[in-house]
Image (spheres, helix red, strand yellow):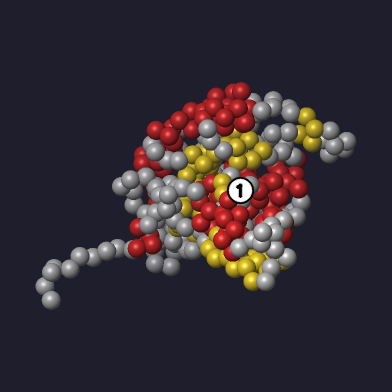
Amino acid sequence: MQSTAQDVERTLCEWVDPFLGAPLGKAVRSVGLDGGRAHARIVLGFPAAGYASELEGALRTVLLAMPGVDSASFDIEWQVAAHAVQKNVQLLDGIKNVIAIASGKGGVGKSTVAVNLALALAAEGAGVGILDADIYGPSQPRMLGISGRPESPDQRSIEPMTGHGVQAMSIGFLIEEDTPMIWRGPMVTQALEQLLRDTNWSGIDYLIVDLPPGTGDIQLTLSQRVPVSGAVIVTTPQDVALADARKGLKMFERVEVPVLGIIENMSVFVCPGCGREESIFGAGGGERMAEDYEITLLGQLPLAREIRADADEGRPTVAKDPDGPVARRFRETARRVAARLSRNPRNWSQAFGTVQLGTGQP
C-alpha cells in the first residue's frame, strides 16, 4: 500500500525529537507528497542552527522507510516565543524569556556554565543577553572579556555591553574590579532591579540570569519581581552539592517558577594525557535527583582544564573552540534548555499587546 500525505504527516508528528523529549506534533506545519517526493516544513520552538541538518537527516531516514516515498526534503525553521511567567509580575521590554541559572552552593561552576550556555544559545541562532546578578562577586565581565563602562545617552538608562555576540550587564561594569560591595540586602536587591530594568535590552529571546549561590535576597527578589520563564539548577554529582541543589529547586517550586531541569557540571574528568575517565565527585547524582523530582537532566558537562582557563582569559570555550567536543556538549545542553522551555505555556500578552477599551460612543 502506497503512503499518503496524511501518512507522512502523521509519521512526522509522532516522531520523538531527542531535545524536546516529545513528539514534534504542531512543529510540523505543512506536508506534501507528489509522485513519491515528500516535502515538509518544520518550525521548532527553539533555536537549532547546529541541529537542523541532523534533524533533517533523521526525518529523511524515517520517511524513506515508508512505502512509496522515494525522496524527502525539508524546510526547517525556528520561532522563539515568549513563555508564561509568575502572576502579577511586570514584563520587560525587549526580552521574551528570562532563564535563571542557580545553584544551592558555590563552587559548582555555575557562572562558567551560565556564560557558555548564553554563548551556545547565541551560536544556535537566538538573540541572547546575560545579566550578572551576583552583586557581591561579579564574574561575567572577566569571563566575557569586556572592559570599559556602559554608555547612558539619556542619563536614565544604560546600553548593554557586548561580548562574543551576547548583550551583557553587570555591576562589575560600573565599579573597579577590586572594589568590594559593602551593601546590605535592600541596596543589593535595588541594584539588581536597576541593572535589569534600566538596561536597554534589545531583541532578546533568552536573558540568562547568573544568580549568586544560595536562596537569599537576590533569589527572592528575582522570583517575586522579575518575570522568569524558567530556572535551571546547576550541581555537581557530589552529595553535598546535591543537597543544596534540592533546596534551590524547592525554592523555585514554592514561588511558582518552573524548573526546566538540572545540569550536572564536573560530571567526569578525562585525563588529557591518557584519556582515562574518572568520576572525581561521584557518579549518577544528577540522574538520581532528576528522577526523584521528575524533571529533566539537561546535560552532563565534563571537568576540563580548558573550560576554566578559557573563561579566565575572557574567551569561554564555546567562543574559543566552537567546534570542539566541550563546546558541542554545551550546545546540546543549551538546546535541551530551550527545547524544554518551548514546551511550557506561552505568554500571549506580548503577542497581543495592550488592549484599550473604548467609551462605547461613536
Structural crowding at the residue carrying mark 1, measured as other residues with C-alpha within 10 Å and reported as few (<14), some (14–19) or many (≥20) = few
Q: Which residue is mark 1?
A: 16
The C terminus lies in quadrant: bottom left
Q: Is residue 111 visible?
A: yes
Q: Nearer the viewer, residue 340 or 306?
A: 340
Task: Residue at the far left: name it.
Answer: 361
**Residue at x 40% of width, y 41% of height:** 223
**Residue at x 84% of width, y 33% of height:** 276
Task: Residue at the far bottom: name it.
Answer: 362
The N terminus lies in quadrant: bottom right
Is 308 above or below relative to 207? above
Task: Name the spot of residue 330 as percent of width and height, x first.
Answer: 66, 47
Task: Name the spot of residue 174 as percent of width and height, x first.
Answer: 50, 53
Task: Name the spot of residue 287 as percent of width and height, x first.
Answer: 62, 31
Whether residue 290 sits left or right of residue 326 in the image: it is left
Q: Is residue 196 visible?
A: no
Q: Nearer the viewer, residue 329 or 162?
A: 329
Whether residue 267 sits left or right of residue 105 in the image: it is right
**Residue at x 75% of width, y 40% of height:** 305
Query: What SS does tag 1 mark?
Result: strand
Is 133 above or below relative to 95? above
Q: Nearer the viewer, residue 134 or 352?
A: 352
Q: Nearer the viewer, residue 109 or 34?
A: 34
Image-quadrant location for residue 128: bottom right
Task: Name the spot of residue 230 as percent of width and height, x first.
Answer: 47, 44
Image-quadrant location for residue 55: bottom right
**Residue at x 20% of width, y 65% of height:** 357
| Mark 1: amino acid | Val
